[in-house]
Amino acid sequence: MAPIRRGLFGLTVASTAACLVLVGCSPAPKPIVGVERTAGGSAKVLIVPCPGYVPDLVDVAAAEGMPRWSISNVAGKGASEIEFFKVPEGWRISTDAVFDLKTTGASYIVGVMGGVGARAVNARLAFDLDRLEALEEGEVLVRGGKTVKREDFLKPDADRCEP
């Protein structure tokens, strides 16, 4: 092999290895969004309190994609809980299709898009009506259909906010 080709080959192998190390060692995203039932029987999105994290969009949709309800953060302030289909102060409706969780299909997806400074930190949680209705007071539904105690879910932990 010619010296130039060996040099290019070596550079390619080294740069590929460096990319694999950087990508392969990145931690998996940690869940920052959960769902809980309210005392009135509706649902609420919970967002882990991450230092500097500001959610920009919260989206609730049937698993098929429609109907969909979403709100945008126009105030630029953080939020840790948002009741489904209620617009908090400083937010506005982006897509207004309020629907009854009990009659519109059985599977849903909650999406939260936001960031810390210029770094995006987004989350998505798929859940079904049976799991939501099975929640007891003080329980939060998280990824993988698991439940955790509310106080454990909302414990501040900067590491959970890393993408």
Image (cartoon, rainbow, N blue to C red):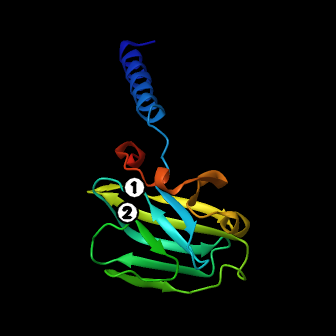
The local crowd at label 1, few if under 14, some if 14 to 19, many if 20 or more residues have their Cα within 10 Å, is many
Name the one closer to the observer, 27 or 11. Answer: 27
Q: Is residue 161 above or below residue 14?
A: below
Q: Which residue is mark 2?
A: 114
Residue 151, numbered label: none
**Point 69% across, 69% down: residue:** 133
Percent x, y of residue 115: 34, 59
Q: Is residue 37 left or right of residue 77?
A: right
Mark 1 falls on what kind of element? loop
Left or right of residue 125, residue 91 in this image: left
Please name the residue shown 64% across and 63% down the image: 136
Q: Position of residue 95 (x, y in %)?
A: 49, 84
Along the line of sight, which residue is nearer the eye, 44 or 109? Answer: 44
Residue at 48% x, 47% y is 30
Identify the secondary structure beneath mark 2. Answer: strand
Residue 121's tag is 1
Q: CA distance from mark 1 to mark 2?
A: 6 Å
Name the side, left or right, on which 119 lies relative to 124.
left
Specify the amino acid type for callout 1: Val
Q: Residues within 10 Å of mark 2 (few under 14, many from 20)?
A: some
Question: Where does residue 31 sit, x and y in percent of width and height?
Answer: 50, 51
Quarter of the image where one finds residue 100: bottom right
Which residue is depicted at the point 42% across and 46% down?
160
Query: Relative to 44, does residue 135 appear above or below in the rendering?
Result: above
Amino acid beneath label 2:
Gly
Q: Nearer the viewer, residue 108 or 45?
A: 45
Q: Is residue 137 above or below residue 42?
A: above
> Of marks 1 and 2, which one's residue comes earlier in the chain?
2
Percent position of residue 138, x then y: 55, 61
The answer to the question of whether label 1 and label 2 lie on touching residues, with beta carbons closer than 8 A, is yes
**For residue 64, what is the image quadrant?**
bottom right
